[in-house]
Amino acid sequence: MALQLGSSIRRLFEAKVLAYSTIPDGLSRWDEMAIAMAPVIEQHAPVTWQELEGAAAAFVPGVNRSVLLHLAVEYELYVETSREKHGLMAAVNEKCTGFGSPGLSGQNNDEDPSLYLDAAEDVVLAVRGCEGLSDSALIYTHPGWPAYMGMNGAGLAVLWQFIDNGEQRIGVPTNVLIREMLTRPTLESALEYLQGVPRAIANNFILTDVHRTVNVEVSPSHFTALTVNKGFVVHTNHIIFDQEMQDHDVGIIQSKTSVERYHALRNLVAAHGLAGMNRGILAGMLRTHPIFRDGAEGTDNHTLASMVFDVVNLTMEIWFKGDGVGGASGHFFELNGGPLNACAEKGKSIAANLLTM
């Protein structure tokens, strides 16, 4: 299984190298970013750092720590180069629609399929921690990226939608932030982590447990959290809550669909009401146009995955791009504990259980 995942990582890395080789100084800037962020990751993201080293040791030749470190910071390079319009096709400001309500959350991951091998390599990682259920997780991601969205065994789900106020600095990369938040035992401790570490770019995160949903708009200098104890929140790719960030919102200018998707999901939820809202109903909403993306709306991004997290029952259901919009049932996963035997090699936990589609 490690060989299969390692081969997927290598193919995606080579595709990214090819893409950035067409951008002026793209590869050298990628190298510089990886070198600059490596000590930040080591200092502020110890679990991810340990997993990078453990995964590099577990996989195939050609997948080493340098490759995995480059992929961990790749999204920040993508944001930088997309702003400069050097030829990457996808509009970074068209990425993702999310929903959160106490006990239930879900979102679509929208990206340019040509930059991710048509999502054919995407996976759900089942990470089994040494403490059993408490430090286990289900993580959707592209092979090699630490985490995109996920849920841990403590009943915390983390979603992510890109927003942009133009800020960028050397900090903990987006996909590393998500992985580290999923190691926290409570929603409050995940928020404390997110607020306390240096952040590389602006993003929106939706954190959900059984009791509440917290929406957080962040940038390198901003941290604005909205707590929902009863009700719901919808977020896409424009800034909603932090008014100072709104005054510098790049997404609202560049995105063709962010406001449309926001109102579409907002209206679907309002029309149904939260009473009776469940995994299947939310999944149906996420897989409804224009929230669901297949290029028909005049953008390059497609929905590569739709996923729903039930943190009450610790279950996840996900539909991949290849499943098509009409599939009634997704791929169902459940966190049910079970520690690894080799707890001394905790850094290799990311390779311990791989659920591929």
Image (cartoon, rainbow, N blue to C red):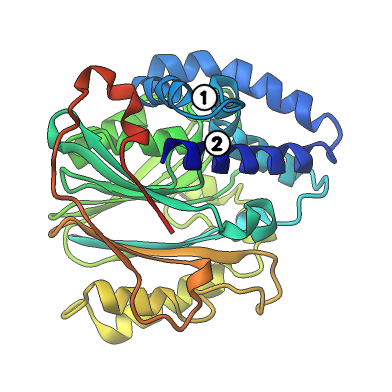
Which residue, given by chain and number where applicable, does mark 2 sit on? 201
| Residue closest to the eye, 51 or 95 | 51
Say if 339 sits above or below 343 in the image: below
Say if 216 sits above or below 285 in the image: above
User: Would residue 261 be found to the left or right of residue 33 on screen?
Assistant: left
User: Would residue 89 be found to the left or right of residue 246 on screen?
Assistant: right
In this rendering, does residue 226 appear at all? yes
x, y (%) of residue 250?
64, 51
Earlier-in-chain disc, 2 versus 1: 1
User: Would residue 74 be found to the left or right of residue 155 on screen?
Assistant: right
User: Would residue 130 be found to the left or right of residue 174 on screen?
Assistant: left
| Residue closest to the eye, 241 or 21 | 21
**Quarter placement of the N terminus:** top left
Q: Which residue occupies 52% across, 67% down?
A: 321
Which residue, given by chain and number where applicable, does mark 1 sit on? 171
Is the C-beta separation of discs 2 and 1 under 8 Å?
Answer: yes
Task: Name the outermost residue toward the bottom.
Answer: 271
x, y (%) of residue 213?
24, 55
Question: Quadrant location of residue 79?
Answer: top right
Q: Secondary structure at mark 2?
A: loop
Spatial CA distance of label 2 from label 1 is 8 Å
Q: Secondary structure at mark 1?
A: loop
| Residue closest to the eye, 194 or 159 | 159
Q: Give the residue type at disc 1.
A: Gly
Q: Which residue occupies 52% across, 81% down?
A: 289
Q: Which residue occupies 36% across, 82% down?
A: 328
x, y (%) of residue 228?
23, 57
